[in-house]
Image (cartoon, coloured by chain):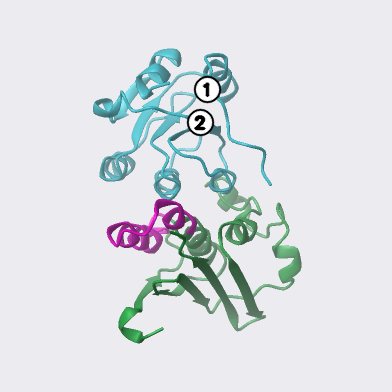
Amino acid sequence: MTIEDIRVILGGKYFVGEEWKDKEVHTACGSDMMSDVLAFMKDQSVLLTGLCNLQVIRTCEMMDIICIVFVRGKIPDEAMIEMAKEKDIAILTSGHRMFSACGLLYENGLRGGPDYR
Amino acid sequence: MSSENTIVMTYEVPADDFTRAGEASSSVKSKLKKMGVNPETVRKVSIAMYEGEINMVIHAFGGKIDVIITPEEIKMVLMDQGPGIENIELAMQAGYSTAPDNIRSLGFGAGMGLPNMKKYTDELIVESVIGVGTTVTMKVMISE
């Protein structure tokens, strides 16, 4: 699935990274707790979150996450947009709630990582 | 190990500035990438150091981090003069946290910091004295 596929499935909008829309996404993680996200290490992932602050971008930078979807229509601020551009992380926003957004991506074939060990 | 093959970097972590938390880890990540260290090792170091850096901001009024890089390993030493950890064994348990609610609303304080640091490193040593401070030493071996 590509970043653009995610945008279409979630009826989302780009804030950063429309130029990276053809990048492949292999796995997804949905959480508002950044330490839970940091326990999940997979290549070319998307993060779905309702948390909207600078540490979300930092967390994704550390994890090499390539795309963030802010659910419930959350809007990133300028500092977040600038940092995401600098770190090559695409940002989408979707009106869906977390459960529905994750369900739609799962239904379309995207999977999470292995269980936490 | 000869000292000419050792790189030492030192960072100050400011107190109570949550927006700047992670700057040191970000800088280390970008330097390791430029040095050509393999991506998985870079990610392990970045995540472990970032968790430690966040802990220093949340619990310990900031502190100092030394990163020592040799061809074999990356060692991170995080030193603070915070309140200290009362029960290290308990703090190592996944889900145990003493972080206040306002930190949880920022996405941290889930009690996964130290477990994650252990998960991503080859060695983790936590030394703490109540009222004096905490030193966390982590090592990640550089794999080919």
A20 over A100 or under it: above or below: below
Q: Which mark is residue A27?
A: 2
Residue A100 in the image: x percent, y percent?
57, 18
Q: Which residue appears at 51% of the width and 77% of the height?
A: B79
Q: Are marks 2 and 1 on the same chain?
A: yes
Q: Which residue is mark 1?
A: A110
| Span shown in magenta | B19-44
Callout 2, which amino acid? Thr
Callout 1, which amino acid? Leu
Identify by letter the chain in cyan: A
Q: Would you call the spot at circle 1 few (<14 residues within 10 Å), some (14-19), or many (20 or more)?
A: some
Residue B11 in the image: x percent, y percent?
37, 72
A28 over B79 or under it: above or below: above
Front residue (pair A22, B14): A22
The overriding secondary structure of the stretch rendered in magenta is: helix
Q: Earlier in the sequence, mark 2 or mark 1?
A: 2
Q: Hey, which quadrant is residue B118 in on the image?
A: bottom right
Residue B3 in the image: x percent, y percent?
35, 85
Q: CA distance from mark 2 to mark 1?
A: 6 Å
Front residue (pair A22, A62): A22
Badge 2 vs badge 1, beta-carbon distance below 8 Å = yes
Is B29 inside the magenta-drawn segment? yes
Task: Tell me if B75 is positioned left or right of A22 in this view.
Answer: right
Q: Hey, which quadrant is residue A52 in on the image?
A: top left
Q: Hey, which quadrant is residue A16 in on the image?
A: top left
Q: Which mark is residue B39?
A: none
A87 over A21 or under it: above or below: below
Identify by letter the chain in green: B
Circle 2: element type: strand
